[in-house]
Image: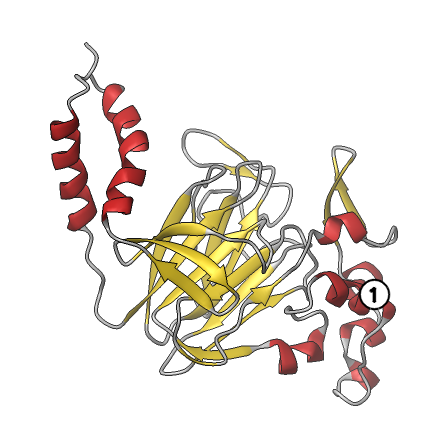
Amino acid sequence: MALPHNPILFLCIFIIFASGATKPANAKNFTLVNQCKDMIWPAIITDGSNFHGEGFTLKPGETAFYNAPNGWSGRIWGRTGCSFDKNGNGTCQTGNCGTSVNCTSSGSLPVTIAEFTLGDIDYYDVSLMDGFNLPIVIKPGGGKGNCSTAGCDGDLKQNCSSDLVFKKDGKVAGCRSACDAFNTDEYCCRGAYEDPVACLPTNYSKSFKQVCPAASSYAYDDRVSIITCSASDYMVAFCATRNNTICSFQDEKLVCSVTSEGFKAFSQIWRIVMLALPLASILQNFF
């Protein structure tokens, strides 16, 4: 039997769900948003965890949340072209991190990574040092310090040099870093080049920087690309650019990024409204 379309009943259910979530003390809230046209599988790894991490499915337009304790340090990235069975076993075309939804290894190259070290002052950046598979944008929710937006202004796959192109099933799935593609000291900043004076931007890293000006494009680029900020909330948006307006939920409010400096929050009623359709669809499946 179909669930009756009773707006009062739905409203009560929405309020219960919307008000039930609580935030751990001193936690930093991450809002992950899929702006891609296709499904992705975000991965989260805590540094020093021997690559035992988390993973999940995120459909186009969906939002997910992750609470990290103060002092957390780790990486977030998006996997593409994944195929998992009902037990969560499988692999991905890019960003693969083992044979299950929850990661058991680092992301396979090429992969765009959002990096964080959290504390009284947070450090974050979008890194292209392992190549590129998806545009990623990091937007802090206000805060003190630089707190600028990290990430890309476009899709690097569309501007990838032919000798760095990474293909799967005949399609461009990513763009390799010069270090990964050629494995030389010059491109990997090692040996005689293991010094910021000796290891300089190359034509390859410059092409990365042109598309993603607020991202680390090679090993010593992170000295100027790492951003310092003190915020309680961060948005990580996949397939977004720095100038996109991205809306999601944060602190029980609908939150939209309207400038490169942060978010604009709206009333909690919008959270209830936005939850209505997906929740109604779920409930109907059980009646």
Question: Image check: 84 left or right of 252?
Answer: right
Question: Image check: 262 left or right of 71?
Answer: right
State which quadrant residue 66 falls in: bottom left
Its colouring scheme is: secondary structure
State which quadrant residue 276 falls in: top left
Q: Is residue 179 visible?
A: yes
In the rendered view, tell whether residue 28 sits above or below residue 273. Answer: below
State which quadrant residue 142 falls in: bottom left
The residue carrying pointer 1 sits among few (fewer than 14), some (14 to 19) or many (20 or more) residues within 10 Å by Cα, namely some
- The N terminus sits in image quarter: top left
In the rendered view, tell whether residue 255 sits above or below residue 259. Answer: above
Question: Image check: 245 left or right of 264?
Answer: right
Residue 167, image x, y percentages: 77, 42
Three-letter code for the amino acid on which mark 1 is drawn: Tyr
Nearest the eye: 93 or 57: 57
Nearest the eye: 273 or 89: 273
In the rendered view, tell whether residue 173 sits above or below residue 43. Answer: above
Q: Residue at x 40, y 67 (%)?
A: 141
Question: Image check: 100 left or right of 241?
Answer: left
Q: Secondary structure at mark 1?
A: helix
Nearest the eye: 152 or 38: 152
Residue 266, image x, y percentages: 31, 55
Q: Is residue 97 visible?
A: no
Look at mark 1 in the image and give the residue it sits on.
204
Residue 234, image x, y percentages: 41, 64
